[in-house]
Amino acid sequence: MTKSDLVNYIAEETGLTKADASKALEAMQNGIVKGLKEDGKVTLTGFATFAAKERAAREGRNPKTGETLKIAACTAVTIKAGSKLKDALN
């Protein structure tokens, strides 16, 4: 499912226009980003938990050449599925 498919689905399910559904989806995405930046964690009970985790700098290898390279430290996002999401898929 693409973003436009999701916007269409939201519009059909809620009766919103596609423009309003798109704004709602953007607001949700922005809210999750803001929550991760400020609190480091966003929980949508029953659906998923998004968490920001710091990854330390480390050495890696280019699989083609075998050359060693440095991978910079970064912040990664982990997503853990909630019980309702797991149950819906199983």
Image (cartoon, grey):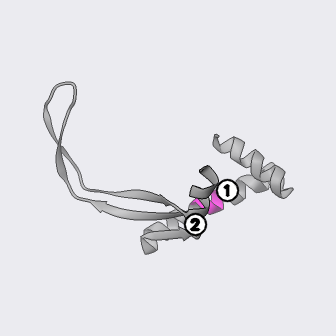
Check the image and report above or below for 85 versus 5: below
Residue 69: which quarter of the image?
top left
Helix, strand or loop at mark 1 = helix
Membership of 28 in magenta stretch? yes
Q: Which residues are magenta?
A: 25-29
- Residue 79 lies, in percent from the top left, at 46, 58
Check the image and report above or below for 41 versus 24: below
Q: Is residue 88 visible?
A: yes
Residue 26: which quarter of the image?
bottom right
Q: Which residue is mark 2?
A: 31
- Residue 17 lies, in percent from the top left, at 84, 52
Q: Which residue is mark 1?
A: 25
Q: Residue at x 81, y 54 (%)?
A: 13
- Residue 64 lies, in percent from the top left, at 21, 25
Helix, strand or loop at mark 2 = helix
User: How many C-alpha atoms fall within 10 Å of the one at disc 1: few (<14), some, or many (≥20)?
Assistant: some
